[in-house]
Image (tube, helix red, strand yellow):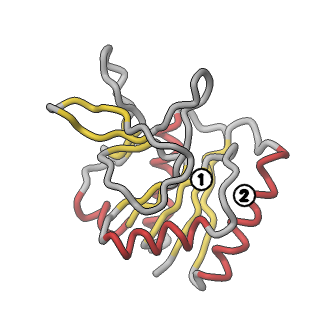
Amino acid sequence: MKLAIGIPVVYGVPGEAWSFIATAIARAAKVFPEFMIATTVDQFPYEKARNMIVDACLKADVTHLLFLDSDMFPPADIAKDLYEAMVESKSQVTTGFTYRRGGEYRSVWYSQHEGKAVEVYVNDSVPEPIEIRACGMACTLIDLEWANKNLEKPFFVFDRTPGNELGEDIN
């Protein structure tokens, strides 16, 4: 297994987030002997930055990619925890709990009901993994080998169609 942490950096990394991100990187490098960091700087739109990171990781034979947004405050062991949840649940994508920016700070987890995307409402402490159908990418681990075999490129597309409820998600 080769892990990469992918960080699309926009306007730098906020100082208050840096120590959390640096600690998560250091812990991941200890747990996963084959490890790299993949980043972009000021690449827009966001889906372009994410696809650039994916391409770099595929060229480097990365098997698992953990996206962390540069303004995240990830727990120190986020890479290990998400990987263990992925193995335990036999899923191809696992995500940490993150909030939408601004306003009500709602969840960025979605499920499907009657063919439509609906938000999954949970509190801050989710005691065990739950199944969702879509999520934001701010703190998400992807089995890149699976994605490369099963998904069409580009992996990330932001659909700007009016009324579309999902964007910048795995295609």
Work out which quarter of the rendered image holds the C terminus and state it.
top left
Amino acid type, mark 1: Leu
Name the residue at the bottom extreme. 33
Helix, strand or loop at mark 1: strand
Q: Residue 61, image x and y in percent?
A: 45, 74
Q: Residue 154, image x and y in percent?
A: 34, 46
Residue carrying label 1:
68
Amino acid type, mark 2: Ile
Q: Residue 9, image x and y in percent?
A: 67, 44
Front residue of 169/57: it is 169
Q: Are marks 2 and 1 in contact (CB under 8 Å)?
A: yes
Residue carrying label 2:
21
Q: Residue at x 32, y 14 (%)?
A: 162
Name the residue at the right extreme. 15
Q: Residue at x 43, y 63 (%)?
A: 128
On screen, 83 above or below 129? below
Q: Is residue 98 left or right of residue 136?
A: right
Please tell me how crowded label 2 is: few (under 14), some (14-19), or many (20+) other residues with Cα within 10 Å: many
